[in-house]
Image: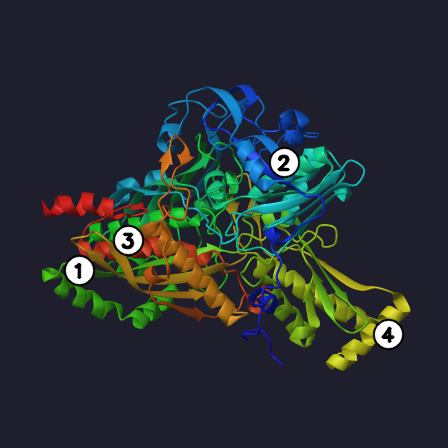
């Protein structure tokens, strides 16, 4: 039976719908304490004193400060600049200063309110532009966490030969991941036994690495177990290291299990968000509509500490020139420091920011030179054999023109443009249609996958069942189901004969983090290789023939294990041939493969209430081979819904570096009533080095909605707005002025 391409039942589906799945807040250990974090109310300053006040039995509480840390007081990630607990200085509001634990969670909350942290304020930076202009130096010598420079051709020579030079600036705001389940962990810890953490997370080995440093323990003394996780979207990539460290420190000092689960307000105010961005474009083009040169300055706000800003910036930089061929490209990018809580991973990982700027800018270029947006893009789409901004030669078949034509057919694009133009003349409700064309690379950038050297294992039982050993986590996207499909297809076994081991660093190898659209394409390929290793072992041993039935496989496993013991196979990542990347020049093959897409949005703008709504949305993408059509469509639908929120609804309101709308009553996200029909379509062009030809798709749908929607709003109103989120207040300011 063919399993790839079929909508098989989800592996964890029954447990979830029957309520048997156990999330972190469902777990309780004997003698468990509850933990809480006391945080800074000041954006930047020196800690002068900590006092414990009120009618609180303080002798009953476990108290941990930076002085109690047994190892290094830094969250091990990239630059190692962020402390688990502030010692002498704080650098953002909500920075952890002190930890408390007590058996009574209600008394614990009362106690937290009676800890007084006296801080002498220091000058702070709250604006990305103020950081760029070095209004105050708050990090290093220039406020820059990381910078990149991409150079292709000779940009300096193109300006004199250009018929048109078009410039523009574009801005995007922060966005909260707003996963259904808040951050939470349970830890047990003791010097003699080490540390074990159970938690809601995406990347168990990230947490493992951080705890090794925090406690200065051997790797085998740290164990991290992912429990059922209610969503992540990048928000549970790096932050669980922080909360896990806090629970483990309290457990270490108390000798008892400690649970920390954030409420929604704390989760929203203290954890990472999508990086705000500021992009400047300068483009040289001929009167025939051909790109000559692109100069792009891309800046993201990293917040107070580096966290993952360097790699978010990397992806945003590489995607900044889009799916177009341009002979001369210069991209300069920076991640800068502000005194905001650190920004971090969020689905799309920098690409939604830079793609938004590019797709809005290309509409401006097209208008300037007298072309329609679609004709201008058609003249500049990249093709097989041409090079991207990093001089990566495209070896896969790319048909962006075909995708664009099909998307227009699916949406009746040309006819609607004409019809809307006529009806808008005398209507309060202005309708428009717009599109975005884009690509998204799958897997870690450049040499990232090679450096990581991910490993996946497969283990057969004497009953002929196969267990997949991987650290990749199921967070709602279907990892367990897709891995089982890939394994069953490769071995020609029943889907139900495949089991997926719980991600547990004490039991599964490091297959890398569940991020970067890599789970299916990269780790899934390792799953395929690992299970084929089992098959090959049985064939070499003479216990299995090339043509076999599931019963033959079961019998071969039984005999092999009886004769030789455990039957396991491991597969380690090896880059596909011809993949070369130069980290120094930031040049070469940035990704093994790209997914390609055209998204079309239809909108209505109310000229009295100044509200914009999306009426219809078509998402068309080429993603290699679709492993599970229902899960794949669900990924696209969910990503588009998040993209609509990012564009029109979700505005983080900051006050002196603090998020002040940190509740679901005042942080407005779209509900089902605000989401239009999202029609999802796939083109299949199997990728040779993906499992059954699949590429990654998880981040792709975040990239296209914002520019498609704003392009449609411009089509409806004739007004160009180049920032998101686009709230009614912005439309009042711009359109109200137009109407006098």
Residue 548, can we see it? no
Mark linked to residue 559: 4
Q: Compute the Cα span from label 1 to label 2.
A: 56 Å
Tell whether label 2 touches label 3 (CB within 8 Å): no
Q: Which quadrant, please, contains the N terminus?
A: bottom right
The circle drawn on residue 710 is 3
Q: Where is residue 240 shown, x and y percent of the image?
A: 59, 44
Q: Quickly name the residue at label 2.
A: 101
C-alpha span from label 4 to label 2: 53 Å
- Residue 614 in sight in this render: yes
The quarter of the picture where residue 558 lies is bottom right
Mark 1 vs mark 3, CA separation in Å? 16 Å
Q: Is residue 436 left or right of residue 385?
A: left
Residue 650: x and y in percent read: 36, 48
State how far apart marks 1 and 4 are (Cα). 73 Å
Residue tagged by mark 1? 429
Front tag of 3 and 2: 2
Report the residue at 74% width, 66% height from top.
533
Q: In the image, which is nearer the foreground, mark 1 or mark 4?
A: 1
Q: Choose the circle earlier in sequence order: 1 or 3.
A: 1
Are the residues tagged 4 and 3 within 8 Å (C-beta)?
Answer: no
Q: Earlier in the sequence, mark 4 or mark 3?
A: 4
Residue nearer the viewer, 357 or 247: 247
**SS for dot 4:** helix
């Amino acid at each position: 039976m063919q399993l790839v391409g079929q909508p098989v039942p989800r592996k964890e589906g029954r447990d979830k719908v029957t309520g048997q799945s156990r999330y972190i807040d469902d777990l309780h250990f004997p003698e468990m304490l509850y933990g809480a974090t006391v945080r800074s109310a000041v954006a930047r300053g020196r800690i002068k004193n900590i006092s414990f006040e009120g009618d609180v039995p303080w002798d009953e509480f476990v108290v941990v400060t930076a002085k109690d840390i047994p190892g290094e007081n830094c969250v091990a990630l990239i630059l190692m600049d962020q402390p688990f607990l502030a010692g002498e200085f704080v650098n953002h509001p909500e920075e952890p200063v002190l930890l408390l634990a007590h058996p009574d969670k209600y008394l614990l909350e009362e106690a937290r309110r009676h800890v007084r942290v006296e801080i002498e304020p220091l000058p702070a930076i709250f604006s990305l532009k103020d950081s760029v202009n070095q209004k105050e130096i708050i990090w290093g010598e220039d406020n820059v966490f990381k910078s990149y420079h991409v150079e292709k051709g000779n940009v300096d020579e193109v300006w004199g030969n250009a018929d048109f030079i078009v410039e523009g600036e574009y801005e995007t705001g922060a966005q909260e991941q707003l996963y259904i389940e808040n951050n939470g962990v349970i830890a047990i810890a003791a010097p003699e036994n080490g540390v074990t953490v159970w938690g809601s997370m995406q990347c168990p080995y990230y947490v493992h690495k951080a705890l090794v440093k925090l406690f200065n323990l051997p790797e085998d003394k740290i164990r991290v177990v992912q429990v059922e996780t209610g969503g992540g979207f990048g928000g549970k990539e790096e932050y669980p290291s922080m909360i896990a460290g806090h629970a483990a420190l309290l457990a270490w000092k108390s000798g008892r299990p400690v649970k920390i689960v954030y409420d929604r307000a704390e989760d929203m105010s203290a954890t990472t968000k999508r990086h705000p961005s500021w992009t400047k474009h300068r483009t040289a083009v001929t009167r025939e509509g051909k790109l000559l040169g692109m100069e792009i300055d891309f800046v993201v706000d990293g917040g107070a500490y580096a966290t993952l800003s360097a790699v978010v910036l990397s992806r945003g930089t590489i995607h900044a020139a889009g799916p177009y061929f341009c002979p001369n490209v210069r991209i300069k990018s920076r991640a800068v420091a502000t005194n905001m809580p650190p920004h971090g991973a969020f689905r799309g990982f920098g690409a939604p920011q830079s793609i938004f700027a590019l797709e809005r800018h290309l509409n401006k270029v097209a208008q300037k030179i007298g072309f329609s947006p679609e004709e201008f893009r058609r003249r500049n789409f990249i093709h097989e054999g041409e090079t991207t901004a990093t001089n990566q030669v495209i070896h896969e078949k790319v048909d962006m023109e075909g995708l664009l034509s099909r998307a227009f057919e699916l949406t009746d694009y040309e006819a609607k443009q004409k019809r809307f133009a006529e009806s808008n003349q005398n209507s309060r409700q202005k309708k428009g249609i717009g599109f975005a064309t884009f690509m998204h690379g799958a897997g870690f950038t450049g040499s990232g996958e090679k450096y990581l050297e991910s490993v996946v294992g497969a283990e057969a039982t004497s009953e002929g069942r196969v267990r997949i050993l991987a650290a990749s986590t199921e967070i709602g996207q279907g990892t367990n189901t897709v891995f089982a499909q890939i394994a069953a297809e490769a071995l020609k076994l029943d889907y139900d004969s495949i089991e997926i081991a719980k991600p547990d660093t004490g039991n599964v190898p490091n297959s890398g983090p569940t991020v970067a659209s890599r789970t299916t394409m990269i780790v899934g390929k390792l799953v395929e290789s690992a299970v084929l290793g089992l098959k090959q072992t049985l064939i070499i041993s003479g216990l299995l023939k090339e043509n076999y039935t599931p019963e033959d496989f079961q019998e071969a496993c039984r005999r092999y294990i009886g004769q030789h013991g455990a039957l396991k196979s491991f597969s380690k990542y090896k880059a596909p041939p011809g993949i070369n990347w130069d980290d120094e020049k930031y040049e070469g093959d940035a990704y093994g493969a790209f997914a390609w897409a055209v998204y079309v949005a239809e909108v209505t703008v109310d000229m009295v209430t100044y509200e914009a709504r999306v009426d219809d949305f078509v998402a068309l993408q080429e993603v290699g081979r679709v492993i599970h059509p229902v899960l794949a469509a669900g990924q696209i639908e969910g990503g588009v819904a998040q993209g609509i929120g990012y564009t029109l609804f979700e505005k983080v309101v900051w006050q002196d570096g603090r998020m002040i709308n940190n509740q679901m009553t005042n942080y407005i996200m779209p509900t089902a009533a605000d989401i239009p029909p999202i029609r999802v379509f796939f083109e299949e062009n199997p990728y040779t080095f993906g499992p059954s030809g699949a590429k990654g798709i998880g981040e792709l749908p975040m990239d296209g909605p914002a520019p498609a929607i704003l392009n449609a709003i411009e089509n409806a109103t004739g007004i160009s707005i180049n920032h998101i989120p686009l709230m009614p207040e912005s439309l009042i300011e711009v359109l109200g002025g137009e109407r006098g």
